[in-house]
Image (cartoon, grey):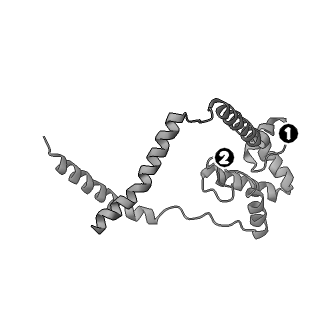
Amino acid sequence: MIPRNLRLTALLRAGCLAAALLAPLAGQAKEAAPLADDPVVEQRMIAISEDLRCLVCQNESLAGSHAELAEALRDEIRVQIRAGKSDKEISDYLVERYGDFVLYRPPLKAATLLLWFGPVALALVGLGALVRILRRRSREVPAATLSAAEADQADALLASLERQPQDSSDKRSS
C-alpha cells in the first residue's frame, strides 16, 4: 500500500508534467478571427450582433461571444449584409430561426408578458405577503403588561443595577 503523502506527491508531479507539456500548446491557441474584408460590413455586423444574444453563452451578446455558434451566426449576418438585406430583415431571420430568445430586448406580446411584467408581479406578491404576515403578527402579540408583583421585581432589579457601579467604585477606592 502506497502512503497517502506519496500518492499526493505523485499526483502533483503528474499535474506539473502535464502542465509543462501542454504549455507550448496554449501559445498556439486559436487567434481572433480576422475582420471581414469590408470594414463597413464588419461595423454593421457588430451593430446588429450587439442586440442579439449568444445562444450558447446566455448573458453575452453575439458580438462578444467566442462560441462556435456565435461565430457561425456572425458569418451568417455578414452573408446577409452582403446579400443586401436590411438590419430588420436579418434580425427577423434570426428570430424566425431561433425565436425571441435571440433578442436582448424581446418585443412586448402575449408570449413575453410574463418576461416583461413577471418580476413586478412577483415583487407585488411578495410585498403583499409581507404586509399580511406583519399584520397577523402584530395582532397575535399581546401588549406586554406587568402585574404589580412583576413591576415591583423589575424596580428592584433596576435599583440593584444602579447600585452596582457605585458598589464596584467603592471597592476600588478602598
* Figure disc tally: 2
Q: Nearer the viewer, residue 133 or 38?
A: 133
What residue is at 72 percent from the left and 38 percent from the top? Answer: 122
Q: Mark on residue 55?
A: 2
133 sits left or right of 29 in the view: right
| Residue type highlighted by circle 1 | Lys
11 sits left or right of 139 in the view: left
Report x, y in % for residue 61: 68, 55
What residue is at 73 percent from the left and 46 percent from the top? Answer: 102
Q: Nearer the viewer, residue 53 or 94?
A: 53
Report x, y in % for residue 85: 85, 54
Mark pair 2, 1: CA separation: 21 Å
Whether tag 2 and tag 1 are in contact, CB under 8 A, the answer is no
- Earlier in the chain: of badge 2 and badge 1, it is 2
- Quadrant in which residue 126 is drawn: top right
Q: Is residue 32 visible?
A: yes
What residue is at 79 percent from the left and 63 percent from the top? Answer: 44
Q: Is residue 97 visible?
A: no
Position of the C terminus, as image quadrant, is bottom left
What residue is at 63 percent from the left and 56 percent from the top? Answer: 65
Q: Mark on residue 150?
A: none
Report x, y in % for residue 171: 29, 62
Q: Mark on residue 109?
A: 1
Q: Assign a secondary structure to mark 1.
A: loop
